[in-house]
Image: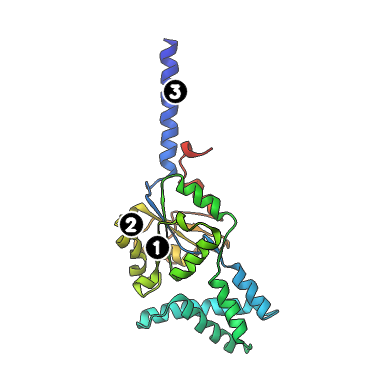
Amino acid sequence: MKAFHYLLSVFCLLLSVAGHAQESNPGGFKVIAFDAFPIFDPRPVAQAAEAAFPGQGQKVMEVWRSRLFEYHWLRGLGGQYEDFMAAAESSLIFTARQLNLELTDQKKQQLLGEFMNLKMWPDAPDAIRALKSQGLELVFLSNITDQMLRNGLKNAGMEKEFSHIFSTDAAASFKPDPKAYALAVDKLGVPKEKILFVAFAGWDAAGAKWYGYPTFWVNRQGAPAEELGAMPDATSKDLQGLVDYITPVLGKD
C-alpha cells in the first residue's frame, strides 16, 4: 500500500512538472523569428557618431534614426523602395546638412561601416544555444539587409545557428508592412501562430501583433510601450527573459 501511494505521488509530481513545462512554451512555438537588434548591438554606431562629431553624437543619432525610419516608410508608401543601407546613407547626409556638420567621405564610411560590421550583444550566443537546444528553428526577419545579417553572424562564428535569413528586401518593403512580416510564413510554410516574433522596438512589437504573430519584446532600452493598440505577449530587458519564457522546466539545468 505504501508503495502504491509512493508511485501515485511520483506520478502526480511528474504531471505537475509537465504542466509547468507546457506553460513555459504557451504557444507550442516551432520557430522564433528575430528582428536584428535583439541579437546585434547597435551601440557602436552611436559611439562612432560621437567620435566623428565630438559633443554632437547624441543629436546626430536622434536625427539620423528618425530620418532613417521616415525614409523607410515614406519610400515604402510612395513605391520608391531602397534598401536599409541606401536609406541609411541618404538619411545620414540629410542629418549632417540639417545639423550643419561636415560629413567627409571618411566619416560617412566609418559610420555606415559600423552597420556592416555588427557584433552580438554579450548575452546573445548563450541564449541562441539555449533556444536551439529545445529544437526550435531560429530565423531572422529584419529590415536590414541580408549581407548585414550574414556579416554579424560571421563575426560571432554562428552562421549555422539560423536556418533562414529573411530581409524585407525580398518584399521590397519594410516592417510594419504586412507583406514584410509575411515573409517568414510564406517561406517556411509554418502558421503564424507557431512563429514567435522577437522585437527590439516597441513599434515592431505592435506591427507583429497587428500581423498576427505571437510577440516577445526584448526591451533593452527600457522604453515605454507604444500606444498602438497592440501589446506584446511578453517582454523582458534581455534575451535571458526570452529563454525563461520558452525553455521548458524539464529542459533547464
Q: CA distance from mark 2 to mark 3?
A: 37 Å
Measuring 38% from the left and 49% from the top, which residue is drawn there?
29
Give whichever of 233, 33 is nearer the camera: 33
Residue 142: mark: none
Q: Identify the element where label 1 is drawn.
A: helix
Q: Amino acid at mark 1?
A: Ala
Nearest to viewer (mark 1 / mark 2): 2
Q: Identify the element where label 3 is drawn.
A: helix
> Against 239, is 43 above or below?
below
Q: x and y percent of residue 231 in the render?
A: 44, 59
Measuring 59% from the left and 86% from the top, which residue is drawn there?
105
> Against 136, is 156 above or below?
below
Left or right side of 188 for 118? right
According to the picture, the residue beneath numbered tag 1 turns out to be 208
> Against 157, is 133 above or below?
above
Measuring 53% from the left and 58% from the top, which residue is drawn there?
157
Q: CA distance from mark 1 to mark 3?
A: 42 Å
Residue 10: mark: 3
Q: Earlier in the sequence, mark 1 or mark 3?
A: 3
Q: Amino acid at mark 3?
A: Val
According to the picture, the residue beneath numbered tag 2 turns out to be 192
| Dot 1 crowding, Cα within 10 Å, few <14, some 14–19, many 20+ | many
Left or right side of 194 for 114? right
| Dot 3 crowding, Cα within 10 Å, few <14, some 14–19, many 20+ | few
